[in-house]
Amino acid sequence: MERPRYFEDYELDEVRHTHGRTISETDFVVHAGHTGDFFPHHMDAEFMKTTPFGQRIAHGTMIFAIGIGLTASEINPHAFTYGYDRLRFPKPVFIGDTIHTVLTVSALLPDPKRPGKGIVTESCRVMNQRGETVMACDHLLLADCRPA
Amino acid sequence: MERPRYFEDYELDEVRHTHGRTISETDFVVHAGHTGDFFPHHMDAEFMKTTPFGQRIAHGTMIFAIGIGLTASEINPHAFTYGYDRLRFPKPVFIGDTIHTVLTVSALLPDPKRPGKGIVTESCRVMNQRGETVMACDHLLLADCRPA
Amino acid sequence: MERPRYFEDYELDEVRHTHGRTISETDFVVHAGHTGDFFPHHMDAEFMKTTPFGQRIAHGTMIFAIGIGLTASEINPHAFTYGYDRLRFPKPVFIGDTIHTVLTVSALLPDPKRPGKGIVTESCRVMNQRGETVMACDHLLLADCRPA
Amino acid sequence: MERPRYFEDYELDEVRHTHGRTISETDFVVHAGHTGDFFPHHMDAEFMKTTPFGQRIAHGTMIFAIGIGLTASEINPHAFTYGYDRLRFPKPVFIGDTIHTVLTVSALLPDPKRPGKGIVTESCRVMNQRGETVMACDHLLLADCRPA
Amino acid sequence: MERPRYFEDYELDEVRHTHGRTISETDFVVHAGHTGDFFPHHMDAEFMKTTPFGQRIAHGTMIFAIGIGLTASEINPHAFTYGYDRLRFPKPVFIGDTIHTVLTVSALLPDPKRPGKGIVTESCRVMNQRGETVMACDHLLLADCRPA
Amino acid sequence: MERPRYFEDYELDEVRHTHGRTISETDFVVHAGHTGDFFPHHMDAEFMKTTPFGQRIAHGTMIFAIGIGLTASEINPHAFTYGYDRLRFPKPVFIGDTIHTVLTVSALLPDPKRPGKGIVTESCRVMNQRGETVMACDHLLLADCRPA
């Protein structure tokens, strides 16, 4: 649903938790087919038995796409994505893991180049059912300042 | 196919171009369904006619997933992804655009924390058929140094 | 295949059984992606462990779409769907259940508004492998009467 | 997101509009593959040129699944679907049409069989970009009454 | 539906025509994702503009899979596929073409190695909307002889 | 990646092994949906329990499409597929099996009808994780002879 917010409406340290989603073998197969990345790390259970992981691991690009997708429940018409920084995957995601995303507003800065805009930094952490962080990044939003 | 390369085998400024891929309406629909992000920017042609874009625009997460997926044609068993930095989307991707990815080795640094490893920075640029950059990021690879 | 039948060719209480189909986790994921309904009841195995169901349950709309889809093996060029009445879901469908549909002609009435047409009511019951009804509805068909 | 509401919190005639979604050829193909219904009305453009429709028409089950799916933006933990009544498809949906759903609370009745529960009837109308109703039904919700 | 037939029930030169199906861009994308074959002939519209085809052409494996799939409308419990011979693709299939399959029983031979079985050869031709053959093969079925 | 080879560059008995891929229930469901073949052999686990197989078996057309798809890692601009001969499925593929393809150049013949072309026969064998051949065929390639 729509939730209009100006730059001034964001508060430092505000936190939002998404619903959870169980990552299935289907997601692995769909992501391989969507991206064309059929590397055996994601697709060959026999090969992965011979590695320390012991089983197939999710594509990083999938955890990013689904982890960010989980946050897409409210639309702010006054903001749009500027980019993402420091995207990291500290732990693997396995078939059957359940992930959710925690968003924390970690910085609020006026945009030095665009008058009337501010940069909202949302720290994104994707967590699994064991409370481990499996992905982290900073989501940069460009938000309109409230009209004078 | 497999192409084993040690940290020392990478060369600064070496460039790789991927094949191209036409981004279809199907990719939009598959990505929405894969991620759960059905925002009208990607899914509502009537709404988008009322915006400056004039038509639906691709999810940033899709251009990232497919743009990186295009590079997945050779496996280096001596390297793995550490993360991505400065992910940006300077231009929108529309239905029917054809993209490919250009990888340039832009930095080669020993890993200060992990002896025997080096950090390869691949600058990734996803280009459309008009020669415009629609996505850019730095891909950080952790590569084994050649055994002494 | 085509099987032309006029209104007069239907018989009260005639019964048709479809083939069976095992409902997989894939179907859950595809249906969520197709409809945009990622509610945790269907997608979050951890959450569902905390409920009386103990596991994910299928979308009602999926059991309807697949249950009716199972009947789509013969085309009658003299009839088309008018609508569905009293659609109910008395039992949940879990991943791994196998369903089939039983159609019974339960009413045959001349169409009061459309001369030359009759209304065929097919009572649809979707059953699981334990013999339980998991979905029921009345399918209303508008069929041409046999030309004089 | 979650929005807890008791039976008493619903108001007669309250209305909710969903976002829009453009129905693509992809949706037709995905739905056929999901349900197994490959009838030529949905899948054979050449055949449909010979009919009054002139082009492929959407599966009714798809418009139901997507039309209801569009409403799945807020979860009420105090209510669940009891069923659907009088599902009708007054107009066809073509490839490229954009639909949204309008929900109106049209009846609020205590449940005669289940003390402490009420039945909320949401009248659902799926509309296209020309303002035509392409699907209508009554969605019956069983909602908890507010604890005394 | 089921249609039991013994070897003796097949007749030389009997012909069956399937329904038609329009091959969409979605089918191209799904097939690439299903098989991992993202060759530019199927996926890169810009590249194909530079070739004599002028546009993307379907994977041969897709025309085989869909062309044979179109025949899967009746199950014979007394026969199963032994293999396929002389699979050829005399013409390309483009996005938007509508195909159907014509099956002709072209040979009926007792199985020299398996007493009580016969080999039914079905000549399969996949045709497009211009009446051109886009795929041909011989489908070999092993069928039970009628019990004495 | 591209690997240009003329007819003269192929050597008799040269062998290529592909990566492996685990065939999942998702692949079964995707293939049924892609082709429209929902026969209970592939889709009904309860029915298959009553057969000697004991479980669902893969579509032959899927093993062909994926088995050949696994070989699509290098493009030879001087060759294209002429057809396939003697396609056989000696063993079933079950959900969870991991397959790879072995290609052996088994014949190299000048094309009698097309001067300047040669026919390369690649014997394709799809193997499972138990070393069994689950599919075999001859892939015929038409390759340009090296310009004089």
Image: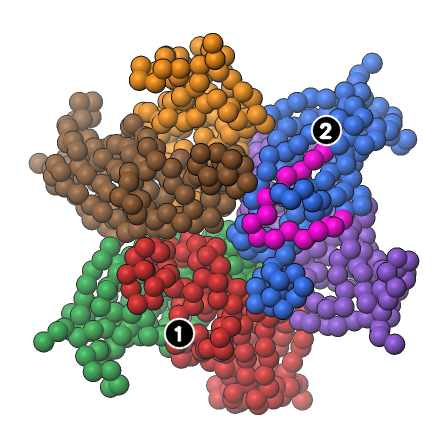
Chain colours: A red, B green, C blue, D purple, E orange, F brown
- The residue type indicated by label 2 comes to Val
Q: Distance between the Cα atoms at labels 1 and 2?
A: 55 Å
- In the rendered image, which residue does mark 1 sit on? A91
Name the foreground residue: E122 vs E3. E3
Q: Quadrant of residue C138?
A: top right
- The residue type indicated by label 1 comes to Lys
Image: C33 above or below E58: below
Image: A56 above or below D127: below
Image: D147 above or below B3: below
Does E13 sit left or right of E37 as displayed? right
Q: Which quadrant would the C terminus of chain C be assigned to in this image?
A: top right
- The residue drawn where x is 42% and y is 79% is A85
**Mark 2 neighbour density, 10 Å: few (under 14) some (14–19) many (20 or more):** some
The question of residue D22 being in magenta is answered with no
Q: Position of residue A67 (x, y in %)?
A: 50, 70
Secondary element at image label 1 = loop
Which region is colored magenta?
Answer: C88-103
Secondary element at image label 2 = strand
Residue F76 visible in the shown view: yes
Image: C64 above or below E19: below
Name the foreground residue: F15 vs B27. F15
Q: What subunit carries mark 2?
A: C
Does C140 sit left or right of F24 as displayed? right
Q: Position of residue E89 (x, y in %)?
A: 35, 30
Q: Which quadrant would the N terminus of chain C be assigned to in this image?
A: top right
- In the rendered image, which residue does mark 2 sit on? C15
Name the foreground residue: E129 vs C48. C48
- The residue drawn where x is 22% and y is 58% is B2
Q: Position of residue E48 (x, y in %)?
A: 36, 45
